[in-house]
């Protein structure tokens, strides 16, 4: 009986090891074996050709400063450092400190900043459009990170990011399509986006449950007659509740029904229109209409 139990235990252990082998990233250091933390959405790229291609997609030049969100084990960081004047890489997981020290030892133009990038504000200290963002974004903070840079007073010149394929589709969606939303419009307000390459899940370790894509966003200054902050606020409101009409969503923002209706009609749009039907020109015009509309805000009509 004892032999039989030992054999069963052996089978269980063997099966467990087969499962574990697919969830462990072996990073070559003197004494480290790193197990990714699902909390941080850690899925590492190791293909050097792909990493080099992503750095090339970002258009990094010898005089550029690059901000990377999620340094991970430093694979993309190293590729960026080869091309850039300076790389500032943010990483939240302190367990990677020794690993990064080993993997990036050959580069003296990299600064690692430890902590939550959303709390540290990576745009601080930069002039607008004076730096580049390049990152394999952790999936769990993709949208907040993108909005953080897009809505900053000091936005980057471009952003080249690895995201879930579904998110990439939303980033380049057209008005009226199912994927078109606040993120799409926010990108359109600041610049243009394109998918540069698709990346299969099998190229990550551990592999995620979905495929990915690399998207490059090129940003440009808003025209001087456009209040970017005001337009961005209207865009967010327009998609706050997708099934509601634009008029209703504007009321939720604090405008009276009369003012919201007058602004929508002033754009030549039906009062039943939803935010997903508006392009960037429409949002800019709507913001001007609602700002200049003579109908006053009242609480009773919210």
Image (spheres, rainbow, N blue to C red):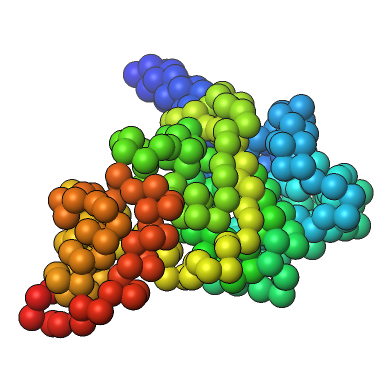
Work out whether residue 29 can be spotted. no
| Residue sitting at x 54%, y 59% | 150
Residue 91 lies in quadrant: bottom right
Front-most of 28 and 236?
Answer: 236
How many numbered discs, if any?
0
> Residue 271, image x and y in percent?
16, 55
Work out whether residue 289 can be spotted. yes
From the viewer's perspective, is residue 106 above or below residue 56?
below
> Residue 161, image x and y in percent?
61, 44
From the viewer's perspective, is residue 101 above or below residue 175?
below
Quarter containing the N terminus: top left
Residue 222 lies in quadrant: bottom right
Quarter containing the C terminus: bottom left
From the viewer's perspective, is residue 5 above or below residue 158?
above
Relative placement, left or right, of 181 versus 158 is left
Front-most of 111 and 61?
Answer: 61
From the viewer's perspective, is residue 279 above or below residue 48?
below
| Residue sitting at x 43%, y 37% | 173
> Residue 9, image x and y in percent?
42, 25
Q: Quick one: which residue is furthest to the left in this view?
A: 300
| Residue sitting at x 74%, y 31% | 53
Relative placement, left or right, of 188 versus 279 is right
> Residue 29, image x and y in percent?
79, 44
Front-most of 216 and 89?
Answer: 216
Front-most of 48 and 237?
Answer: 237
| Residue sitting at x 63%, y 61% | 221
């Amino acid at each position: 009986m004892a032999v039989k139990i030992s054999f069963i235990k052996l089978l269980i252990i063997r099966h467990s090891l087969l499962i574990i082998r697919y969830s462990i990233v072996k990073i070559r250091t003197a004494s480290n074996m790193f197990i990714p933390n699902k909390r941080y959405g850690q899925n590492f790229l190791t293909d050097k050709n792909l990493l080099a291609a992503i750095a090339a997609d970002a258009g990094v030049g010898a005089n550029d400063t690059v901000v990377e969100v999620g340094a991970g084990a430093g694979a993309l960081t190293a590729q960026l450092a080869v091309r850039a004047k300076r790389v500032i890489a943010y990483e939240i997981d302190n367990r990677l400190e020794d690993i990064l020290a080993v993997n990036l030892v050959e580069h003296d133009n990299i600064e690692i900043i430890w902590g939550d990038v959303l709390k540290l504000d990576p745009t601080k200290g930069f002039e607008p459009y004076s730096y580049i963002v390049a990152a394999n974004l952790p999936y769990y903070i993709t949208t907040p990170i993108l909005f953080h840079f897009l809505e900053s007073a000091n936005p980057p010149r471009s952003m080249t990011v690895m995201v879930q394929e579904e998110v990439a589709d939303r980033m380049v969606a057209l008005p009226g399509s199912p994927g078109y939303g606040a993120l799409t419009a926010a990108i359109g307000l600041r610049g243009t986006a394109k998918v540069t390459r698709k990346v299969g899940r099998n190229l990550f370790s551990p592999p995620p449950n979905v495929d990915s894509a690399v998207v490059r966003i090129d940003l440009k200054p808003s025209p001087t007659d456009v209040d970017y902050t005001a337009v961005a606020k209207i865009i967010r409101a327009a998609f706050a509740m997708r099934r509601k009409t634009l008029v209703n969503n504007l009321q939720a923002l604090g405008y009276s029904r009369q003012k919201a209706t007058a602004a929508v009609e002033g754009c030549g749009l039906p009062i039943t229109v939803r935010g997903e039907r508006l392009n960037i020109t429409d949002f800019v015009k709507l913001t001007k209409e609602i700002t200049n509309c003579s109908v006053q805000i009242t609480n009773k009509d919210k």
